């Protein structure tokens, strides 16, 4: 009995370590965005090109915002021990992520922002980095969605879902920060 | 993420040697992504291999390589919830494949680092051959020489100086020293190590794409007009820095969560403190430089105008040195820690002013982000020089704390001049030269004369070779009995140490004079009046190179054929000495319960752990 | 006892060291300098050497003392006789001393010298006898003298040549671009304008114009001392090692006749 208690404690501690390490990882991944935002300020201050499509930008950010709430609800579902709902929510987050990527690619193809300007260069560079994080997020979402069928996740054992949720929230916030930074100020 | 799926270690290993499969899959990965890029490129008639397709193909090659060496079974299949059919090898083959045991990973890192050191050191020998005489002799064109300078610096910095003490000794020793059985992210860690060979090969093969001339700093706009080889510099550095980020993330989490009961922060071994501070530096600054290099790569490939006359040239220099100066503390902070780790053991004397030694490490870490612009005094006005020279001069204060603790411990001790003991004294001696000349460089008027001359080259080689490499060799001898269970030859160890000490000091003290005489950096040719002094440097540098190789030969000999080592030859108090040598896979039979500090000697020294008898493994491996 | 012998030897070697340093090394520590700026650097260098030598010798002597007097007779682990982890006097002196010495270095030479150095750049001081436009291209130094309508001065072999009069205030205007580039004159990289004998260097950055002010205090040229040369100090591509130009510092009358010759050559 005592043995059992100590193993649970070890597992708890191990999980705490995983969570802490993952948060640290997400914390340091903010740094590339600081570099990008700083460079944009250094090169171009607060200039926003008048040709940017504000509606499209707002729509892209809105899709991302919804997907954040969606993935957080997936985490809530597994905490309620509702695996089916969790899997459903994860899959629809993938759908929202794909919709976001489609909008970004559409906007890119429109060339509403001139490529050869300082604003354009910074815009496309930062957008590309942000989209890379989104792509990575889609990959882990798919991986965890597949994995959730096999790894016996439940209300006691949901670290996988939590990690992917945190990651998706992180990249979503990065994408929204990008939107605010390059469309508003 | 994969802790739910248990991979049972089994005797069944890959049919094909993992590294061979890695190379094969890397080739396939490159071919696939290169072909896709070539196929979707809009303009017709372009060549099959372009700068863009190489970049994307390289990513495929690295992924293929990592999967091939074992990440496919070790990481990808478990990620998707599939239990792989083959496990990790348990015999010698585990060193040549993806591994999750921190000790195996540590040895792999040390081997990668040592090979990189020999490779980049060989390049340095070629450079000295060129510089032996004023004219072009060894190289035919100056861009070959400049490529050699760049490869030497890049490989030394990112796969030796940053890696050997952190990825190598850190991975091996830190869990043992804090009484842990494993690290927190063993799979990630195993993955990270295999980025080192990928990165080193990338940088070393960069001249195949064309000679690049910027040196290890990749200054713009020169970088974007150089030949294509510089692409492999950016990509190689990306792989190598990613490896160091993984190491730091893993070790710092391990240190925070996996300390044995009683290993409080106040008792934490000095070397572990060193790894903690250096990991924080890595985690802050390596993502910064990665992003900078991605920007430079885009600047070249697209091309953009971020860092040329129509963008901001200085922005790139600032972004580089913002990382670049913390980087040199990333290199030497673990060396400071090693001095005060090894000296008390060799002296069998309590560590003097331990808390100051730790405070020194922490303040060096914090100040290191505030001094970077002293690399750019030639670009600054009074108002900018003033604060940066202030912080640069102030950083010598916490650096001095490491000296203070070391010298205080040595005073009235009974110091054993074993090979590691001797090398540590030499390391302090050498770093003192680097530190003192650093005070001169911190003064802007002096800096404006000696900046970009051989004076600076000598200065940072004193800190890095003199400080870090000497400590690295010392630590290797110190822990060799622990890692291999075997002892080196004390005669050859000391003889070779004196050899490299004399050769090193001859080569690099003379180099200070060459700098003061007006010899600038990055030149394969120079005015004839500098000929004689460079001849002396070259002879000494070659002697030094031979000395390092002989140390390598000696260490490998000791590992294979050395006499059996006693269990605790130095009578060290830290936890790694409580287990068998080499330690078993699970490190300790029982987790140590620490009840006293590790650096107390003499009458006050009581037992350090409560459960001494249960810790040592009963079954010898 | 230990501390007395150790301290006495340290004082003796420090005094001896200072004597050698001040008498024989410091006047030539930077080998050859002939400008006001160079002398600022040299004085700072010498001051730091004088101040740091005792610190340097303290550590070296401590290490030697350890190896000679404190070494154990065998590698067998035996506890040191003296065990102490604290010494308030030593720690206090070390920490306060290192803070004091670093603050001192920041005030003198650093702060004092920077004031002196940048005072020559104040607008009120800008009455320079001679202006030289220096253009750094890959890979050549081009010198032009706008006051004399000279666009590119060369010596008898057709190499770019910098000639300046001694004892005059010279203003160098430094730019990096390529006037001879076939389609993109803005193409340029970072160079660094360095005359070793001046004791100062300044990076030349594409898109910026920078200034350097120098008074050369005696005549010299590349043949009397090879440190009298214009040297690119920042790596700028494969031609970097050869991006140097011979230089002459001449008397006012020699300068006048050299200008006349150059003007004839260029047909001004």
Image (cartoon, rainbow, N blue to C red):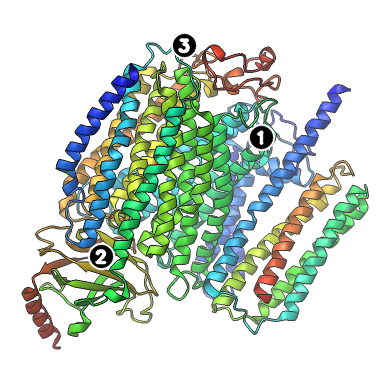
Mark linked to residue C243:
2
Write the residue at 17% across / 61% down: C228
Nearest to the observer: residue B540 or residue B359 = B359
Name the foreground residue: A93 vs A2.
A2
Q: Residues within 10 Å of mark 2 (few under 14, many from 20)?
A: many
Quadrant occupied by the C terminus of chain B: top right
Horizontal and vertical percent position of residue B11? 69, 28
Which-is-in-front pick, marks 3 and 1? Answer: 3
Q: Are marks 2 and 1 on the same chain?
A: no
Near-viewer residue (B243 or C84): C84
Mark 3 lies on residue? C78
Instruction: Specify the subunit that label 2 lies on.
Output: C
Q: Is residue B168 above or below residue B226?
A: above
According to the picture, the residue beneath numbered tag 1 turns out to be B183
**Residue at x-position 47% and y-position 63%:** B316
- The residue tagged with tag 2: helix, strand or loop? loop
Q: Nearer the viewer, residue B155 or A46?
A: A46
Compared across the picture, whether B549 is left or right of C42 comes to right
Q: CA distance from mark 2 to mark 3?
A: 62 Å
Label 3 packing within 10 angstroms: few (<14), some (14-19), many (20+): some
Indicate which disc residue B460 carries. Answer: none
């Amino acid at each position: 009995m005592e043995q059992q208690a100590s193993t649970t404690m070890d597992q708890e501690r191990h999980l705490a370590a995983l969570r802490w390490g993952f948060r640290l990882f997400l914390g340091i991944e903010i740094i590339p965005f600081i570099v990008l935002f700083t460079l944009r300020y250094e090169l171009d201050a607060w200039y926003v090109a008048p040709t940017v499509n504000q509606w499209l930008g707002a729509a892209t950010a809105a899709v991302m915002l919804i997907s954040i709430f969606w993935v957080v609800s997936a985490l809530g579902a597994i905490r309620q021990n509702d695996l089916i709902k969790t899997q459903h929510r994860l899959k629809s987050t993938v759908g929202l992520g794909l919709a976001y990527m489609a909008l970004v690619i559409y906007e890119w193809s429109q060339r509403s922002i001139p490529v050869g300007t300082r604003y354009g260069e910074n815009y496309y560079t930062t957008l590309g980095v942000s989209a890379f994080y989104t792509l990575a997020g889609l990959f882990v979402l798919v991986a965890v969605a597949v994995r959730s069928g096999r790894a016996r996740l439940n209300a006691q054992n949901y670290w996988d879902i939590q990690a992917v949720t945190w990651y998706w929230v992180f990249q979503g916030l990065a994408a929204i920060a990008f939107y605010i930074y390059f469309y508003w100020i | 993420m994969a802790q739910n799926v248990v991979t049972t270690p089994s005797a069944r290993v890959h049919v094909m040697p993992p590294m061979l499969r890695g190379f094969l899959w890397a080739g396939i990965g490159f071919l696939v992504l290169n072909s896709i890029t070539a196929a979707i490129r809009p303009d017709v008639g372009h060549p099959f291999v372009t700068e863009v397709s190489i970049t994307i193909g390289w990513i495929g090659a690295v992924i293929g390589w990592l999967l091939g060496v074992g990440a496919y079974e070790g990481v990808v299949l478990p990620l998707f919830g599939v239990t792989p059919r083959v496990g990790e090898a348990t015999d010698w083959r585990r060193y040549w494949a993806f591994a999750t045991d921190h000790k195996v990973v540590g040895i792999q890192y040390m081997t990668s680092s040592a090979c990189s050191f020999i490779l980049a050191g060989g390049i340095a020998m070629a450079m000295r051959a060129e510089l032996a005489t004023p004219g072009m002799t060894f190289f035919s064109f100056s861009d070959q020489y400049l490529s050699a300078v760049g490869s030497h610096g890049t490989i030394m910095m990112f796969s030796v100086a940053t890696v050997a003490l952190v990825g190598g000794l850190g991975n091996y020793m830190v869990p043992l020293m804090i009484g842990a059985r494993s690290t927190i992210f063993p799979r990630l860690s195993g993955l990270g190590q295999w980025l080192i060979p990928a990165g080193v090969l990338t940088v070393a093969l960069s001249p195949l794409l064309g000679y690049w001339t910027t040196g290890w700093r990749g200054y713009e706009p020169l970088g974007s007009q150089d030949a294509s080889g510089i692409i492999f510099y950016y990509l190689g550095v990306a792989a190598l820095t990613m490896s160091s980020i993984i190491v730091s993330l893993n070790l710092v989490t391990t240190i925070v969560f996996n300390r044995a009961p009683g290993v409080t922060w106040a008792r934490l071994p000095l070397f572990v403190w060193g790894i903690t501070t250096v990991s924080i530096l890595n985690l802050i600054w390596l993502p910064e430089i990665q992003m900078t290099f991605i920007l430079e790569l885009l600047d070249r490939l697209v091309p953009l105008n971020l860092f040329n006359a129509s963008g901001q040239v200085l922005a790139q220099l600032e972004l580089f040195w913002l990382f670049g100066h913390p980087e040199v503390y990333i290199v030497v902070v673990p060396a400071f820690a090693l001095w005060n780790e090894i000296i008390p053991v060799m002296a069998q004397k309590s560590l003097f002013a331990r808390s100051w030694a730790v405070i020194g490490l922490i303040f060096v870490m914090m100040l290191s982000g505030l001094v970077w612009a002293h690399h750019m005094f030639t670009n600054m006005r009074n108002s900018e020089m003033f604060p940066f020279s202030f912080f640069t001069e102030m950083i010598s204060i916490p650096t001095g704390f490491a000296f203070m603790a070391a010298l205080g411990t040595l005073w009235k001790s009974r110091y054993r001049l074993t090979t590691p003991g001797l090398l540590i004294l030499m390391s302090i001696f050498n770093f003192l030269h680097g530190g003192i000349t650093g005070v001169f460089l911190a003064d802007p008027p002096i800096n404006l004369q000696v900046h970009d001359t051989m004076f600076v080259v000598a200065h940072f080689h004193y800190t890095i070779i003199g400080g870090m490499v000497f400590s690295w060799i010392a630590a290797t001898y110190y822990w060799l009995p622990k890692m291999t269970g075997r002892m080196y030859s004390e005669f050859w160890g000391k003889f070779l140490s004196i050899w490299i000490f004399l050769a090193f000091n001859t080569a690099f003290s003379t180099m200070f004079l060459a700098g003061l005489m007006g010899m600038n950096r990055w030149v394969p040719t120079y005015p004839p009046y500098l000929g004689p002094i460079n001849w002396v440097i070259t002879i000494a540098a070659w002697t030094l190179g031979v000395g390092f190789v002989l140390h390598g030969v000696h260490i490998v000999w000791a590992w294979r054929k050395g006499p059996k080592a006693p269990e605790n030859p130095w009578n060290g108090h830290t936890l790694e000495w409580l287990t068998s040598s080499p330690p078993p896979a699970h490190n300790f039979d029982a987790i140590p319960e620490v009840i006293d500090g590790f650096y107390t000697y003499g009458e006050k020294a009581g037992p350090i752990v409560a459960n001494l008898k249960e810790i040592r493994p009963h079954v010898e491996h | 006892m230990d501390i007395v012998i150790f301290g006495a030897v340290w004082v003796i070697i420090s005094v001896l060291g200072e004597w050698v340093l001040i008498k024989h090394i410091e006047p030539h520590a930077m080998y050859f300098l002939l400008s006001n700026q160079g002398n600022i650097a040299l004085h700072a260098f010498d001051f730091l050497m004088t101040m740091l030598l005792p610190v340097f010798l303290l550590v070296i002597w401590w290490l030697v003392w350890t190896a000679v007097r404190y070494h154990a007779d065998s590698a067998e682990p035996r506890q040191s006789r003296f065990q102490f982890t604290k010494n308030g006097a030593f720690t206090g002196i070390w920490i306060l001393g290192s803070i004091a010495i670093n603050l001192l270095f920041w005030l003198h030479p650093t702060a004092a010298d920077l004031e002196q150095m940048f005072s020559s750049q104040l607008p009120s001081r800008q009455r320079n006898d001679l202006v030289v436009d220096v253009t750094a291209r890959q890979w050549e130094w081009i010198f032009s003298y706008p006051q004399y309508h000279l666009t590119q001065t060369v010596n008898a072999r057709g190499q770019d040549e910098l000639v300046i009069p001694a004892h005059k205030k010279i203003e160098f205007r430094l730019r990096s671009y390529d006037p001879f580039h076939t389609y993109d004159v803005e193409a340029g990289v970072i160079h660094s304008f360095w005359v070793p004998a001046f004791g100062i260097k300044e990076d030349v950055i594409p898109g910026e114009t920078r200034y350097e002010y120098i008074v050369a205090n005696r005549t010299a040229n590349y043949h009397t001392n090879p440190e009298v040369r214009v040297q690119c100090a920042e790596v700028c591509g494969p031609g970097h090692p050869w991006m140097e130009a011979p230089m002459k510092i001449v008397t006012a009358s020699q300068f006048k006749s050299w200008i006349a010759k150059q003007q004839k050559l260029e047909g001004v």
